[in-house]
Image (cartoon, rainbow, N blue to C red):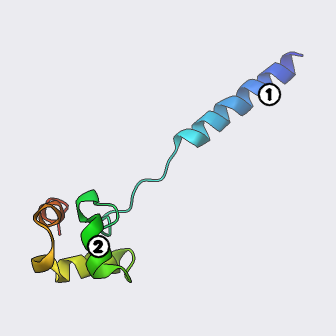
């Protein structure tokens, strides 16, 4: 009985640790990760994903909303 309880406790501990680890958002955001740029990303860069979307937003910076421009600048783009 003691070994079953110990095995159950260990199993629960490992499960909780695994669930607590969530992957971090990729650096740079790609537009979809910067909420202020979501609409602009759809409008100007819908066919791009990941780093290509971020590059597309940067290339179209003069067309973006003020909020998106500010967020990109704050994010280092």
Mark 1 residue element? helix
Quadrant for the N terminus in the image: top right
Quadrant in the rendering for residue 63: bottom left
Q: Is residue 12 left or right of residue 34?
A: right
Asked if the residue at tag 2 contacts the one at tag 1, i.e. Cβ–Cβ closer than 8 Å, the answer is no
Q: Is residue 2 left or right of residue 43?
A: right
**Residue at (50, 48) in percent of width and height:** 22
**Residue at (20, 61) in percent of width and height:** 75
The residue beneath circle 1 is 7
Whether residue 55 is visible here, answered yes or no, is no
Q: Residue furthest right?
A: 1
Q: Nearer the viewer, mark 1 or mark 2?
A: 2
- State the image coordinates of residue 61 (x, y, percent, origin top left): 14, 77
The residue beneath circle 2 is 41
Count every numbered label the image shows and give the total.
Answer: 2
- State the image coordinates of residue 2 (x, y, percent, origin top left): 85, 16
């Amino acid at each position: 009985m003691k070994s079953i309880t110990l095995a159950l406790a260990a199993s629960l501990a490992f499960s909780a640790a695994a669930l607590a680890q969530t992957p971090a958002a990729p650096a740079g955001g790609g537009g979809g990760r910067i909420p202020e740029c979501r609409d602009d990303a759809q409008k100007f860069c819908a066919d791009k994903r990941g780093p290509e979307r971020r590059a597309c937003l940067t290339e179209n910076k003069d067309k973006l909303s003020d909020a998106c421009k500010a967020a990109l600048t704050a994010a280092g783009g």
